């Protein structure tokens, strides 16, 4: 009985983490879009406007990276709940894909920071 309650709590926690990652991405997109619109309206110098967009892309990349890390944590907890070989293999594939995406997003953010 306690084990079933604990599993249900963890399933709820995993679902909450997945939704949290979606909320983080949506929040980041809203912030970046509003900042982009303000920049486009107020900035008269196009070169300065482009530089601001580059900075905004870096911030959005940070939100995306954070959301990916939350999803990886949710996947790890989910694999503990269901340690079948199929679930572990799908977890490994997801973690590899998300890690590669995170790596390249991070590299892009770092290269843009160096150019700023």
Image (cartoon, rainbow, N blue to C red):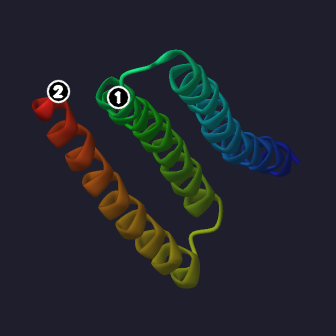
The disc label shown at residue 116, or none: 2
Judge whether 38 appears above or below 80 on screen: above
> Is residue 38 left or right of 1 when viewed as pictured?
left
Q: Residue at the location (61% across, 27% down)?
A: 37
Residue 92, position as x, y percentages in the image: 41, 71
The C terminus, quarter of image: top left
Q: Residue 68 bears which disc, if any? A: none
What percent of the width, then of the height, locates residue 101?
Answer: 36, 60
Mark 2 and mark 1 residues within 8 Å of each other at the beta carbon: yes
Q: Around disc 1, counting alpha carbons within 10 Å, would you say few (fewer than 14), some (14 to 19), or many (20 or more)?
A: some
- The one of 3 and 77 positioned closer to us in this rendering: 77
Front position in the image: 47 or 88: 47
Residue found 58% across the figure and 22% down from its top: 41
| SS state under label 2 | loop
- Up the image or down, 86 lies above or below 18; here it is below
- Would you say 8 lies left or right of 75 here? right
- Residue that appears at 75% across and 40% down: 16
Depth check, front residue: 47 or 11: 47
Instruction: Determine which residue is flagged by label 1.
Output: 55
- Give the x, y percent position of residue 69: 46, 44
Pick whichever of labels 2 and 1 is earlier in the sequence: 1
The Cα atoms of the two marked residues, 2 and 1, are separated by 8 Å
Residue lying at 15% horizontally and 42% vertically, measured from the top left? 111
User: Image height check: is 20 above or below 37?
Assistant: below
């Amino acid at each position: 009985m306690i084990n079933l309650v604990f599993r249900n709590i963890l399933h709820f926690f995993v679902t909450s983490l997945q939704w949290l990652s979606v909320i983080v991405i949506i929040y980041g997109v809203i912030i970046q879009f509003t900042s982009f619109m303000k920049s486009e309206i107020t900035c008269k110098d196009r070169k300065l406007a482009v530089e601001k967009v580059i900075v905004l892309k870096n911030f959005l990349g940070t939100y995306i990276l954070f959301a990916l890390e939350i999803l990886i944590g949710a996947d790890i907890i989910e694999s503990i709940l269901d340690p079948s070989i199929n679930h572990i293999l799908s977890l490994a594939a997801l973690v590899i894909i998300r890690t590669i995406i995170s790596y390249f997003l991070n590299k892009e953010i770092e290269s843009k920071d160096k150019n700023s």
